Image (cartoon, grey):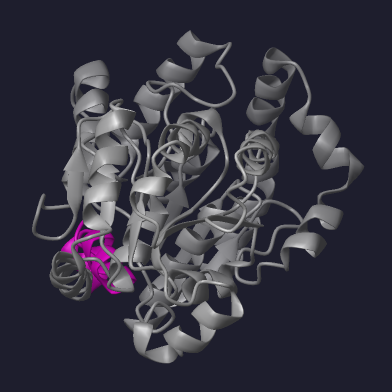
Amino acid sequence: MNIVYHHRTRGRHVEGVHIRGIVNALRELGHEVSVVSFPGADPEHEPPPAQATAKRGRLASAVSRLPGVLFEFLELAYNLVTFVRLGLSISRRRPDLIYERYSLFLFATVWLARERNIPLVLEINDSALVQRVRPLKLRKLARRMEAWCLRNATGLVFISTYFRDEAQKAYGDIAPSVISPNAVDLATFDPARFDRKRLRVERGLAYRIVCGHIGVFAHWHGVDGFVEAIAARLAEVPELALVFVGDGVTLPAVRALVAERGLSDRVLLPGRVGHDDIASWIACMDYAVLPNSNHYGSPMKLFEFMGMGVPVVAPDYAPVAEVIDNDRTGWLFPRGEIAACVERVLELALCAEDRRRIGGAAREYIQRERQWSNNAQQLLSLVPVETAS
């Protein structure tokens, strides 16, 4: 099939990983895929962290700081851009299918697909129904537009059952759907690619039991609370070292805490690294921790850890529990109970055989069910047979 993939993101970080994963998987299945992006975005080639920051520029920074209502009016205005850019792409490429990473207030794609009689599958990663980092001001309008889009698409891809259930509860009779959590590229996240012993020596982790985390340092991810809670108990397991890769608003506070407690040799904070380097850091870990998540999300790092055979301690939110089978492919603790999370991390530092067994089962699960090719096949199952053939 000839497929147009449309999105309104800048195509960086986790969203870029997801876009590249789906696009490459569709191509590997023999389909022709063209990406129509936000002007200036290139999700198929993510720049290094420093370059990405420099490229963000004054305009993007100014837009991100706009008051909520003004920002949402800009999101609405982007429909005009979509009508022009996507309309031209449809005229030139005559796609058999449009696949869109859904964005709030974006209805132009659904309208164009209906007018041109082209099947459209929406991938739902965001919604007016969930709590967002940027509070939603035009909520009623956003929900009305979202309901129309979800009812008039050909098919919907939700990242979790929780997400789909909330949409069905709010909007009633929506388009046919599949549940498709995140996935991983096992060619990249392959432990056999790395000299684990050498990497651990180079990074000061030789002879350590390493528990790690990779992600944004934000309050809702719980890294700051976890580090504060476990800091007083690290003396109980002298061999344990923690590695937290990433940056964000809470990183300075975590750095200050580590320095104040004299734990710089036990808690490594290398900052943000490029996506190409993430697998090498996971290769240094014996197990990983996800201190917090949310009710609807599908954390990308969960799949990358598991793909590397690194088992994860994670909160028992429904989307996480859809992926982790407790005590078989990972370990779940009651969400919000950071003391239980700390206790589990300390216990597992002394259970090498359990870590190896669970890590192996986690990788087998990813190999079987959660590669990007699985996601591509799921989304194609929503396309009418006459189109797919």
- Residue 198 in the image: above or below residue 26: below
- Residue 219 in the image: above or below residue 198: above
Give residue 148's quadrant in the image.
top left
Give residue 26's quadrant in the image.
bottom left
Indicate left or right for 3 with 353 as reference: right
Indicate left or right for 47 with 364 as reference: right
Residue 240: percent from left, percent from top? 39, 59
**Nearer to us in this view, 29 or 48:** 48
Indicate left or right for 56 with 140 as reference: right
Indicate left or right for 344 with 25 as reference: left
The magenta segment: 372-389
Residue 373: percent from left, percent from top? 29, 73
Of helix, strand and loop, which mostly describes the magenta segment?
A: helix
**Nearer to us in this view, 229 or 313:** 229
- Residue 144 in the image: above or below residue 191: above
Residue 280: percent from left, percent from top? 50, 76
Residue 386 on the magenta span = yes
